[in-house]
Amino acid sequence: MIDDLVHLGTTVLLTTQYLEEADELAHQIVVVDHGKAIERGTSDQLKARVGGESLRVVLAQLNQLDAAVAILRRITTDPSNFVVDARLRSINLPVGGIDALTEAVSRFRAADIELLDIALQRPSLDDVFLALTGHTADHGAAQ
């Protein structure tokens, strides 16, 4: 319904604490915390300002975990924020963008490391809100 109004040229002011909804429906977003507008932009602009892209890798073979970690330590933007879960054969690490994904794939191929999955994950608007305010949208709404 909201999409229909927008397509007809109607300006819609949407207030919501459901940031997935805002991400999907809004052309411009204003982040409000304790009654103050603290940031404004499109969803993509806000996510880019906050940064926080991460790479998630799932290995096919547990015995390749150490080699994969060594490769990814050369790619990460923050070695202290590196999460390895041997049980799931997964590694999550902060990166600086899409180039890290292509570099990781290239290095894994060269090292003959088999992957089940690899994905670049961008921050959500929930991540943006948390980074800007220090609390979740639900926490702010409950107070």
Image: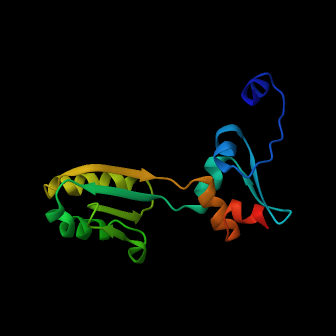
Residue 48's x, y, as percent?
58, 56
Residue at point 29%, 65% (across, down): 72
Q: Position of residue 94 (x, y in %)?
A: 43, 65
Image quadrant assignment for residue 140: bottom right
In this rendering, the answer to whether 8 lies above or below 81 is above
Above/below status of 21 relative to 51:
above
Q: Position of residue 42 (x, y in %)?
A: 68, 47
Residue 99 coordinates in the image, percent (x, y): 38, 53
Q: Residue furthest bottom?
A: 80
Which residue lies at the image location 72% right of the left edge and 28% below the top edge?
3
Coloration mode: rainbow
Q: Quadrant of the N terminus?
A: top right
Query: Residue 130 falls in which quadrant of the image?
Result: bottom right
Kindly indicate the quadrant of the structure image that contains residue 112.
bottom left
> Outermost residue toward the right?
35
Q: Which residue occupies the foreground of this view, 58 or 10?
A: 58
Q: Nearer the viewer, residue 65 or 96?
A: 65
Q: Nearer the viewer, residue 142 or 40?
A: 142
